[in-house]
Image (cartoon, rainbow, N blue to C red):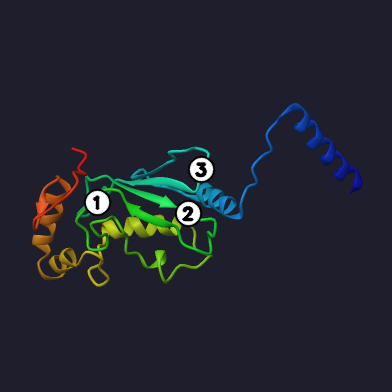
Amino acid sequence: MLKIWSMKQQQQKNEAASGQAKKKKVTAAQLRVQKDLSELSLPGTMKTTFPNPDDILNFTLTITPDEGLYKGGQFNFSFAISQNFPHEPPKVKCKEKIYHPNIDLEGNVCLNILREDWKPVLNLNAVVVGLQFLFLEPNASDPLNKDAANDLMSDRDRFRRNVRSSMGGGQVKGESFDRVLLK
């Protein structure tokens, strides 16, 4: 044990003498995120991008639904993970302004596991699956966008038309939306 300690001290002296920078410590949050990311099994309709490859706590998830009302659109979600992860959920925001009962006009996402139902045993894969499910089955009973939720509950055809119009960059009820259609 003492030999290891003296070797460590010698290594630090050598690094200091040669001007090498001290390595940054890896935090518990970074280790957990690295584990979660390595276990992600994303379908072809999703991909992650890292604007800063050295920062795995901030990345973008792109979802391109291939079925459901949002088929043909491309939606980007920013993930900001704090140093308290997994004790705190990641902060997830939709970068595009879209017409969805569970995503407000500022991009906030209403997903129970991102709020009161978050538990440290949950991982990033659970969040990804939850986001994917929001595009397959929008939930009108727990809305952030009440107009969209009311349309979904009262007139599904009008909701479908509004989704298509908004995805094309159109307006719904005087509100302009970002074009997210790929074609």
Which residue is more in the foreground, 161 or 142? 142
Q: Mark 3: which secondary structure?
A: loop
Q: Residue at x 51, y 43 (%)?
A: 55
- The reply to whether dot 1 and dot 3 touch (C-beta < 8 Å) is no
Q: Which mark is residue 46?
A: none
Q: Mark 1: which secondary structure?
A: loop
Q: Residue furthest top?
A: 18
Residue topped by disc 1: 67
Gap between marks 2 and 3 measured at Cα:
10 Å
Residue topped by disc 3: 55
Residue type at mark 3 is Asp
Q: Position of residue 17 (x, y in %)?
A: 78, 29
Q: Residue at x 37, y 68 (%)?
A: 112
Disc nearest the viewer among 1 and 3 = 3
Mark 2 Cα shell of 10 Å, populated few (<14), some (14-19), many (≥20): many
Q: Position of residue 58 (x, y in %)?
A: 45, 47
Gap between marks 1 and 3 measured at Cα:
32 Å
Residue type at mark 2 is Ile
Which residue is more in the foreground, 104 or 167? 104
- The reply to whether dot 2 and dot 3 touch (C-beta < 8 Å) is no
Q: How many marks?
A: 3
* Picture layout, residue 33 above or below residue 117: above
Q: Earlier in the sequence, mark 1 or mark 3?
A: 3
For the C terminus, give its image quadrant. top left
* Picture layout, residue 158 above or below residue 16: below
Going by the image, does 165 lie left or right of 17?
A: left
Disc nearest the viewer among 2 and 1 = 2
Residue topped by disc 2: 81
Q: Mark 2: which secondary structure?
A: loop
Residue type at mark 1 is Glu
